[in-house]
Amino acid sequence: MKSWRRACAIGLLSAVSAGASAHEGSTSYFELDASRDGGPETGRFDVALIDLAWTLPLDGDADGRLRWNEILDRRAEIAALLGDGLRLVRGGSACETWIGDPWLTERLGLPYLSVDVAARCPAAGPLEISSSLFFDGDAYHRVLVSVKTASATHTATLAPGSRRWIEPAVVSGWRTALEFLRQGAWHVWIGYDHLLFLLLLLLPAVVRLDVGTARRGRAIALDLARIVTAFTVAHSITLGLAATSVLRLPQQPIEVAIAVSLVVAGILNLAPRLMPLRLPLAFGFGLVHGFGFANALAGLDTGAASLLPVLAGFNVGVELANLAVIAAVLPVLLCVGRYAWYAPRAMPALSLAAAAIGATWMIQRL
């Protein structure tokens, strides 16, 4: 059993080195139990190994392979980094924090380093949590925070522009929903693959591909309503299933499938006879994109009471961002769609370019 775990660990650590060139925004996870009167506060901090590898020289022999003994050799530096980057304050007084030895864990199929956290706070009062880890080097980094107090379980997101969370005097589902509404919209804006898929669904909407002429407004509205509704319903279903842990899939196959959706949608736009398939395509790959959205919430311990506002806020944020994209792109398409060159030349060229980008991402993610 030990040899099996060691082999899995080496494989996961090697993936960090192999994937460093494709590093994108990532997520850290911080859980804290502050429900006991008089403390101490105890918790757990999970950070992606790829983030640590970009911040600390973990590969001691510089052979391009990260080994567990190399991480253990740096455990004091890792503890110092995490301790300096994570700050707990209670009642206006800083808490004394201890960082334990690391162990290897996995989140969404990716290797993470986990440490126990303990804190002793000299004063009572509202709790504050702040982090400066990885934000300066990664504008897309997020820390998902779950805090259990005597009264409730709180959830929050720390980001480069909002690095501190303060325990509210009153638990508010609306405040939680608003926080995760912003996160849902942000997740769409940085999700280039999702934006590209949405664009591929929009490109044919302004023309009648059977005769190559511009569509009228009513036909465009009906077509978009069907496509967007199918896409929305589908990704809302899988987002809810995955966020509630009813159905959970690893991250890599989902990311590969999202890239495949770009290839299929791009090719579909080249064949007018296949246009009726856009509706089932939007629904089918909407299910896949929903799992991708759910990965942004994976591992967040919300507590049963706060799950609904988190999920509702995040989903509404996704939908508002989708509508904003449609509102921005559609007027441009309505304008250019009237020209004779759009349907036979411009739309196929844009669709082919998007499919090529999707194929490139698919190969990278494999």
Image (cartoon, rainbow, N blue to C red):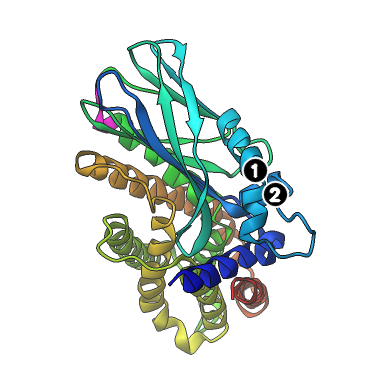
Q: Nearer the viewer, residue 351 or 183?
A: 183
Q: Of the residues shown, which amino acid type is indicated by label 1?
A: Asp
* Residue 75 quadrant: top right
Residue found 67% across the figure and 77% down from its top: 345
The stretch in magenta equals: 170-174
Q: Secondary structure at mark 1?
A: loop
Q: Would you say 166 lies left or right of 195 here?
A: left
Question: What residue is shown with label 1?
Answer: 138
Which residue is rendered at x = 65% and y = 43% of the image?
A: 138
* Mark 2 residue crowding within 10 angstroms, few (<14) / some (14–19) / many (20+): some
Q: Is residue 172 magenta?
A: yes
Q: Quadrant of the C terminus?
A: bottom right
Q: Is residue 202 left or right of residue 37?
A: right
Q: The N terminus is located in which quarter?
A: bottom left
Q: Quadrant of residue 140?
A: top right
Q: Which residue is pictured at 35% across the width and 22% down the height?
A: 167
On screen, residue 21 versus residue 129, left or right, reads: right
Relative to 268, say whether 177 is above or below: above
Residue 336 appears in the picture as rendered: yes
Disc 2, SS:
helix
Q: Which callout, 1 or 2, points at the residue further toward the start of the chain?
A: 2
Is residue 214 among what the camera can see? Answer: no
Q: Which residue is mark 2?
A: 54
Residue 277 lies, in percent from the top left, at 40, 82
Q: Which of 319 and 16 lies nearest the eye of the viewer?
A: 16
